[in-house]
Amino acid sequence: MPVTQAFQEDFIMKKKGLSLFLASLMLTGVLAGCGATAATSGDKGTDAGASSKGSTPVVLNEVAHSIFYAPQYVAIENGYFEDEGINLKLVTGFGADKVMTALISGEAQIGFMGSESSIYAYNEGNSDYAVNFAQLTQRAGNFLVSRKLIDNFSWDMLKGTTILGGRAGGMPEMVLEYILKNNGIDISTDLEIVQNIDFGLTGGAFAGGQGDFTVEFEPHATALEKEGTGYVVASLGVDSGYVPYTAYSAKKSYIENNPEIIQSFTNALQKGMDYVGSHTPEEIATVIAPQFDGTQLQTITTIVSRYAAQDTWKENLIFEEDSFMLLQNILEEAGELPERVPYEALVTTEFAEQAVK
């Protein structure tokens, strides 16, 4: 069996589908029925710098196409990759396992997904494993939506209720359980978490009458509010604390052989981060709007405002050790980490540090 095929099957089977859902749960922001436009196939069709003569082609495979990743799209739309000599082809993988497999097979030079995927790949024993070199988001990107308006929400209100959650082992589900446990809620006896609904369908199921609460990414949360079928009562990003939710990675060998490309890529991303940190949600929404055809500018602005308010994006791309340790703590509590991995093996900060100089 080919290595990439074996890796993908083992990755899915051993992790109970976790890699498929952990970062792809952020795919909610792009699936149909919630007002966002998704890349309907793998190729988003974005070539940043395609007109630059002599530019270096780089394939970036992102786990989902979501407003959650606004700084990346600012970098694309403002030509920052082109300025750095990179002809970027953006592909949406729709699942962390697919993104990781694209890296292993060489179909993509850079992957963007939940950084826990690199931990799983490392523990599988792959010698040319994925190394994280830039962290984009530092908060979970999903929200708790209630069927009823609640003025003063507290997590203990969930006792005795039914929640439409994520798949077992997925990062969003693990973050939810992490919050519940920290609030003294026994997830096995105090409430029911429905985990058998496909990720992109939870919003529709909730609108159709299932559950008392649902956990949704944007733009599903905003869409439910606009339809009057739900009310955002809590941010999992705020209540879980700072978590390295999504990061950029490349194969160890690619980083070693192409440090200048990784540096240029990181420089472009940092410019996107700088723009997001120094401009209003309205300005950011206007810039990234071409990435989300069919989504109203006002909706994009509302979502950007919500993510900005919870401090979703870092000031820089440096993947700190404390964040990596917290991530492993969450995985351990969820029973998904048989062996901890060394920070130094899976994270390099040299490119992100250079990008902010």
Image: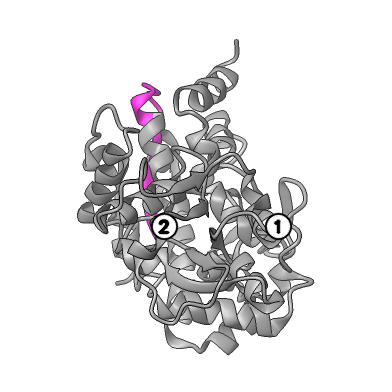
The boundaries of the magenta stretch are: 122-136
Near mark 2 (Cα within 10 A), the count class, few <14, some 14-19 or many ≥20, is many
The answer to whether 239 is drawn above or below residue 287 in the figure is above
**Residue 231 image position (x, y, % from top left):** 56, 74
Residue 134 painted magenta? yes
**Rendered residue at 39%/74% (across/down):** 153
Q: Is residue 67 above or below residue 323?
A: below
User: In this view of the protein, which residue sits in the foreground, 40 or 171?
Assistant: 171
What residue does disc 2 label?
263
Q: Secondary structure at mark 2?
A: helix
Membership of 356 in magenta stretch = no
Tell me if residue 236 comes above or below residue 335 in the rendering: below
Residue 317: tell me if it is visible: no
Q: Secondary structure at mark 1?
A: helix
Badge 1 density bin: few <14, some 14–19, many ≥20, Cα 10 Å: some
**Residue 224 is at least partly visible in this image:** yes
On the rendered image, what quadrant is the N terminus found in? top right
- The residue at which mark 1 appears reads as 204
Q: Amino acid at mark 1?
A: Gly
- The residue located at (44%, 52%) in the rendering is 262
